[in-house]
Amino acid sequence: FLVLQKTIIFSKAGISDIPKEIKFSIISDNSFTVSLVTETAVPGFVIFGQGESLDQTALDDRDSGSKNARFTHHVTLKNLAPTTAYSFKIGSKGELLSQSTAPITSDTPPLPEPLMGKVETADGKVPAEALVYVNMERSTVLSSFIRDDGNFLITLNNARTADLSKYLTLTDSTKINLTAQAGTAEATGKDLLFSDRFVSQDLVLQQTETVKEASWPSD
C-alpha cells in the first residue's frame, strides 16, 4: 500500500513570460524532453532539427493539434536518431540551443519502477499544472507533469548514466531527489531512497524568490 509523505515547495514572485529553469530530461536514443516554466501563461512549443535546419515542431506533451497557454511546459522531441546533436528553439524566435540523443545501448532495460505522488497547494487544493523532476546519483534527469487530480508518475527505469552510455543500475540504496515547479513555484527538494518508491511522495506549493531567466521567444 502507499504511505503518504509530504514536503514543502516554494512559490516565486514576479510576473514575466521569460522561460526559466530550462531542463533536459528523459534522454534516450530516439527522444528527449525540454521543460521550463514561465510566470505568465504562454503557448509552449519547440522547433528543432539537425544543424541549422529547424524544420520540425513539437508541441507540449499535454497538447494535441493546438497550442494551449500554460505556466509549465513539457515538450518531448521524438523519432530522433541515436547519438545525434539536435538544434532547437523554444518558440519560433528563441535562443538556439542544442542537445544530443543517447547511443543505442546493448544492456537490458531495467524492469518498470514507478515513483508516484501528488502535488497540492498549501491550502490542500490541486494546482492547475506542475512539473515534477527526479534526480538520482550519476544519472540523467527524469520528469513528468501532474494529471488533473494532481497525481504524477515517473518511471525510474528510464534513467541512464550521466554519460548516456547505459541504463542506470537501481538498488534500494540509490539516492533520489524529488522536486517540482508550477509556474511561479519551485520545490526545495525532497531526498529519499529507491526503496521508498512504494511510498506516495506528496509535495506542497508555497511562496519563495525568483528563478533563473533565459530569452523568451515570441511566436
Image: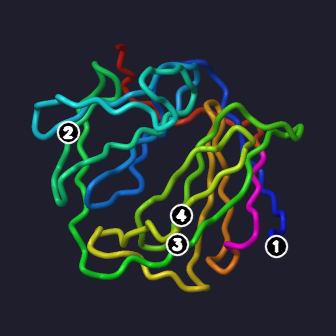
Residue at x-position 25% and y-position 48% = 79
What type is the residue that disc 2 sits on?
A: Ser
What type is the residue that disc 1 sits on?
A: Phe
What type is the residue that disc 4 sits on?
A: Thr
Say left or right for 61 vs 107.
right
Mark with earlier residue (3, 1): 1
Mark with earlier residue (4, 1): 1
For residue 166, what is the image quadrant? bottom left
Q: CA distance from mark 4 to mark 2?
A: 27 Å
Quarter of the rendering occupied by the N terminus = bottom right
Residue 202 among those drawn in magenta = yes
Q: What percent of the width, then of the height, locates residue 182?
A: 64, 36
Mark with earlier residue (2, 1): 1
Residue at x-position 88% and y-position 41% = 124
Judging by the rendered image, the residue that carries numbered circle 2 is 87
Q: Name the outermost residue toward the front.
A: 65
Badge number at residue 155: 4
Of residues 44 and 65, which is closer to you in this image? 65
Labelled pair 4, 3 in contact (Cβ < 8 Å)? yes
Judging by the rendered image, the residue that carries numbered circle 1 is 1
In the rendered view, would you say 212 is above or below 215? below
